[in-house]
Image (spheres, helix red, strand yellow):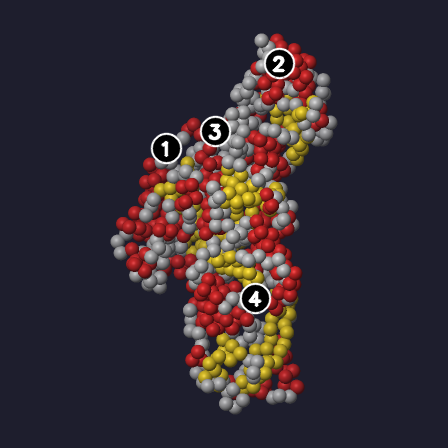
Amino acid sequence: MCRQLKGGGMEIIMFTYKIYTAEEVIQVEKKILNEELLYDIFQMHPDRTVYITESGIVAGIVTLGDFKRYIRGKNEIRFVDEPVTEKKLINTKFTSESVEREIEIFAFLKQKKIAFSVPVLDEQGKILREYSKEKREEKKSFDVIQFLSQVYKETEFFCSETIYILIDQRDGTDTRLAEMLKNKRENVHIITYLPVSELKQLQNQDGQYIYDCRYKFAGVASYFCKNYRLNYFHLASGLIHMLENIENLFAHFVSVGILDNNQYFKRKSVLNIQEIAAKEFVWNSDFNCYEYKKANVQEKPEVIYTVFPLSENPYVRWKTFFVPLCAMFQSDANSTYDSEGVIRANDNDIALNIIPKLERQGVKCIVLDNVQSRYSGWREKLGIDPQQAACKVCYNQMFQTIEKQNRWVAIYKNGYIQLADVQVEGITYRNGERCPEELSEGLDTIYIFGPCVVWGGYVSDNESIGYLLRKRVGRDFNVKAYGVGWNYMNYTIREHEFKPGDSVVIFAADRQVYDLNHIPVFDIMDVWKKVMNLKVHIRDLPYHCDGEVTRGVEEKVFQICESEGCFQKKEDLRNKSKIHFGFWDRRRVEIPQGMRKWLVSVQKEKIQGVKKTGAIVMNCNPFTKGHRYLIEESAKKVDVLYIFVVEENKSFFSFEDRIEMVRLGISDIENVVVIPSGKYIISSETLPGYFEKDENNDLELDATQDLDLFGGVIAKEFEIVVRFAGDEPEDAVTRQYNQQMKSILPVYGVEFMEIPRKKIAGKAISASSVRKYIKEQEYGEVRKLVLPQVYDYLREYYFK
């Protein structure tokens, strides 16, 4: 049988046909029927029909589909009013025992799309036998064995929690696992069945995670695991989406660390991946997290990814820094909820990476406390009934609209789960933004990122937080409000382009993450305390609220923003470049006004009509034989080589002296052009902190703005296709810069080529050594490291 798929193509669906005897048919007496019994039956037999009987006479049927619909809508299981007899069947001729009649029954099952079983009853309504059709759909996208192999590799180094992995025994997975089970670890259990009785036992234990690799039973299992407050993840569909979206997800970061034993991520060609040795992680009891032992010889990634959540403390110590430990797996509609570790990892990315970068570049960040984490027991105390809440009307309208459009609320976009767009009278949600509006050029923008209270699922547009704040501030500021789940909020923030002077308001999930990183968190609990008769204004949780509450939240957000200076004009930041994260949406780089003037001033230096053009950016503090060697080797590989000499005057030697020494040192190389770098290549404006590296070698460098301008503007202007640099075995800050060039420049079509440094007596030539010898007046050592013409220049102007 074939089924037409959306977008073209056919899906092959295979069926097997069986005949079950009266003893093999699944029958349950109506008086003992309950949810838990059906759960255990369908877990073992998802394709079978359960016949409900009264004193042995068939009174109705329940399939797994019926059970799922019952769970979703809490509808009563349907029973027929009178016993089913031969005459109540679709065709009475299916009572014959002849071979011809059996062939007709199977032909009927093959023809009917939704019929999967036909019972044959005697005159009293008791089952004689059952003809069954079981669907076999090929699922080639998810290899359980490969996934479980990765589970073992990761849990060997990280995981201390107890994990139950549920597999489908019917596809042969259980027999293929025989070899793997020989080395089974105590905290990982691979099973085919988890009855209700065991679920009840697990609900009172901490650190229990259930990963379900089965396809058909996920919706039912998630319902029961949610009831028992268990962390349940439906992996079968989640991992398929994961593997399809790796490149999009990783594009949100400049650099991503993966474990060196991870076969999933190595399948894809992703520019910014670096492998991390799994065996080099050790537990650091002082910081209650893992520490990477090779941090001194390897560049720090922005995040480290594993396949699924491994730790309730999702970060890794990297020298004096911390790196978020993120899980690639994302829950779908069949998962109960993401573990606290998943959300905490993404909060760590916001606290450790996103907020520091934004604030360094002049963007004000405001973090609001999670009211829901402090809401325990309020629902019971207030007597809240979700079915009676007044605010559910708008919510139902949104979901009905989505259903009419045949769209799920959750969709995969840009590598992670997002909410579907909605457009109906009074409700607009597009590209993650509630009540969207185009940005007005030249205005600072207030961005709000938060969960359901920002999404506004229970209010109309004119009661949403974004609309209310926009109305309050008038035409002086832009307001953009993005409603997104906590487990994906960091990705949503990373997709946006911010400019100095903007403000970002973040509804935190885990306050502790921000407290540990000394980021102020503002309390907004008083909003809910001030609402009279609160129980009629929230559906079940504080953020599932109506306009009465959202108006109070908007007012509180405004008051906090005002007290923090978000509405003050920031003219001194106008000329600064916009801020990007990762590689996301880097199609066009905005050119600062001052940079335009510099480009005009150096336009005369551009050589026209050449095939291959390269570049080196050099500080040359001072110019050494090592610099000369790098230029010589690079010049051999291109037709024209531009040398951009760092113009920032924060070095031991002045810019005027440094560029003069460069010109003296390369005057005999014909295809080299020397150009002052201006304020937009390795400057205090584009690369804050770089010139502090002599005093702070542990500095964490963020070169994205500097390299965005080089790749997106300068390289295009000068038609540069390759940038050269010497390798850096000693200077950790310069080594970080080289690492980021490897990741970022290829996004703009610029190759990065690292050339081994020239050595004398087995030691790399270093400009810092020359400065040291000059200070110590060891001029003979200086002579060994610089060219004769440069030595003469230094002797005339710098030797005492």
48 to the left or right of 374:
right
Residue 181 in percent (x, y) is at 62, 61
Answer with mark 2 or mark 3, whichever residue precedes in sequence: 3
| Mark 2 lies on residue | 778
Q: CA distance from mark 4 to mark 2?
A: 75 Å
Q: CA distance from mark 4 to mark 1?
A: 61 Å
Q: Residue at x 63, y 76 (%)?
A: 17
| Mark 1 lies on residue | 568
Label 3 SS: loop
Q: CA distance from mark 3 to mark 1?
A: 17 Å
What amino acid is labelled 4 in the image?
Answer: Thr
What amino acid is labelled 1 in the image?
Answer: Gln
Answer with mark 4 or mark 1, whichever residue precedes in sequence: 4
Q: Is residue 158 above or below residue 715?
A: below
Label 4 SS: loop
CB atoms of marks 1 and 2 within 8 Å: no
Mark 2 against mark 3, which lies toward the viewer?
A: 2
Q: Is residue 181 above or below residue 60?
A: above
The quadrant where residue 470 appears: top left
The quadrant where residue 13 appears: bottom right
| Mark 3 lies on residue | 575
Mark 4 against mark 1, which lies toward the viewer?
A: 4
Answer with mark 1 or mark 2, whichever residue precedes in sequence: 1
Label 2 SS: loop
Answer with mark 4 or mark 2, whichever residue precedes in sequence: 4
Residue 105 in percent (x, y) is at 61, 82
Q: Residues within 10 Å of mark 4 (few under 14, many from 20)?
A: some
Marking on residue 192: 4
Q: Residues within 10 Å of mark 3 (few under 14, many from 20)?
A: some
What amino acid is labelled 3 in the image?
Answer: Asn
> Which of these two is toward me, 575 or 97?
97
